[in-house]
Amino acid sequence: MKEFIQAIFCAPTGKYDNLPYPSRLTDDVFRALTEAGINRIFGFGYDIREETQLKTLELCEKYGIYYLPTMNSFGKYISLGNGDEKAFKDLTEEEKAALDEEFIAEVAKYRNYPAFKGVFFGDEAGYLSFDGVARAKRVFDENYPDLEFHFNFFSYSIDDDIFWYGMANSFAKKPNLKKPFELKGDLAVTFKNRFKFYDKLVDGLTAKAKFGYLSQDKYPFESFWESVPTSVHVALFELNAYFAEKKKKLGCRFYNYMQAGQWATGTNRKHMSKGEIALQAHVTAAYGHEGFAYFPGCYPIDYTFDKEREYSMNGAGGLIDIYGRKAEVYDEVKKLNAFFSEIADDILSCEFKGVWAYGTYYNGFKEDEIKNLPDNECIFRGELPAMCRYKEESVTVESSNEAMVSVFERDGKKRYYLINLSTTEKNETTATFGKGRYVAVTDGGKIDFENKITINLDEGQGIYIIRK
């Protein structure tokens, strides 16, 4: 049986004597994660102590979750020479070979643990780190071909420094490194050029090594525009479409990062709605992708050091809060993942054909209210990206708001994914398909119908329709 990747980024952490927060390496936390449908924990973050990793492996085995930790050697491959550490490019061949042996030995320590699934190698490294990432991937594949290797890209919402140095290093003192080309002309980092420079970035890594999994982490419901608290960033649609095309060329799988609550500083958008939680997941699945990674999974310890984030510690951010309790988005994620477990084996066996939109989009604001806002071109207004458009002539949809229909095919039979694109309004929808019998899988059960279904879709809700 096939299953979606259902990961969390920010793993449960152990106790720190100098901090007032309990250990989250408990049966209650891991049981809650299992019940929510989580099947992978990425061990990247504040607590990568060996005792934490070993306890996590033990609890993951007990509760049927895979663990993919980050290890100390990984940063040396990504290093650009900040601080006392040499840049990877400045290592001699002997030093690189020694680093490879260190990497292999670190992974070997965990190789025989049943819950050990592979590694989370790195997050949001820049172009100038890709030689090291690619070398590590090749070394990993030679020694552990049956294990997973995960590296996460940042989105196209970046500047020049992030492109070259990575998200974390963009804030540090920049090392004096030669750049292989200039970000100018069609590659200038502007919204107009977003797919050109982003394609250069993604190809800059994937041309150097073969990756089984790709991911990116643009969070579409952060407070980019305070006066438009129901805005959705266009990247939710554009980057799902982009990677749907990219992964076909590369022969890999893609999963998307899910915004699990709110955590930003200086914002009045402090909670996520049910419609927002649902929409991002359904859109990802409807573009034919293989899974989801929730951020933050467990509320990050380092976020507690920022006074402006205090509102998010007690449930607004994460699936599990800083005290190990189920947070605000937990129940909705659990409900969504129960739905995805119902459709996983079928949809992951299908060929994704493309998407089409029907109806008029309304999401709590009008054009006159946003047309003069800075960067307003990034606000989704209902127009799907040109990539992956596919209209099935036998399908007609009448709806009170905008709906998206995604088309899949398996063994010559069509499947359809119908989504209410509004996160603020329900959507009275009538969809008609070719002659035949169908079953619609919803988060409330299954509906059999002849060739027409009328349903009042909740905010952000998606349903999966199979022709019998």
Image: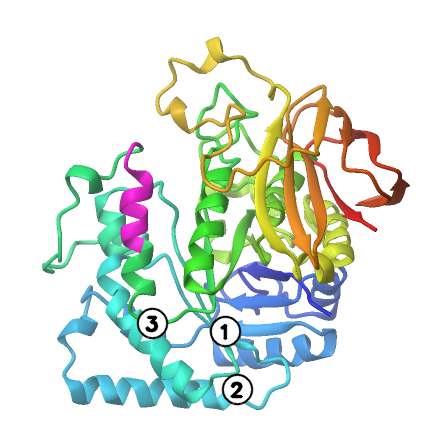
Report the amino acid beneath label 1: Pro
Name the spot of residue 242 as percent of width and height, x first: 44, 46
Circles 2 and 3: CB atoms closer than 8 Å? no
Which label sits on residue 69?
A: 1
Q: Residue at x 73, y 78 (%)?
A: 62
Distance from the alpha carbon under mark 2 to that under mark 3: 24 Å
Residue located beneath label 3 in the image? 209
Q: In the image shown, does 69 or 394 lie closer to the viewer?
A: 394
Badge 3 crowding class, 10 Å Cα cut-off, few under 14, some 14 to 19, many 20 or more, is: some
Q: Is residue 104 above or below residue 25?
A: below
Q: Which residues are drawn in magenta?
A: 192-201
Asked which secondary structure carries label 3, the reply is loop
Between disc 2 and disc 3, the foreground one is: 3
Which is nearer the eye, 320 or 139? 139
Q: How many marks?
A: 3
* Residue at 64% from the left image edge and 44% from the top image edge: 407
Q: Quadrant of residue 82?
A: bottom left
x then y, percent, for residue 130:
27, 65
Which residue type carries mark 2? Tyr
Helix, strand or loop for disc 1: strand
N-term mark: 1 or 2: 1
- The numbered dot on residue 110 is 2
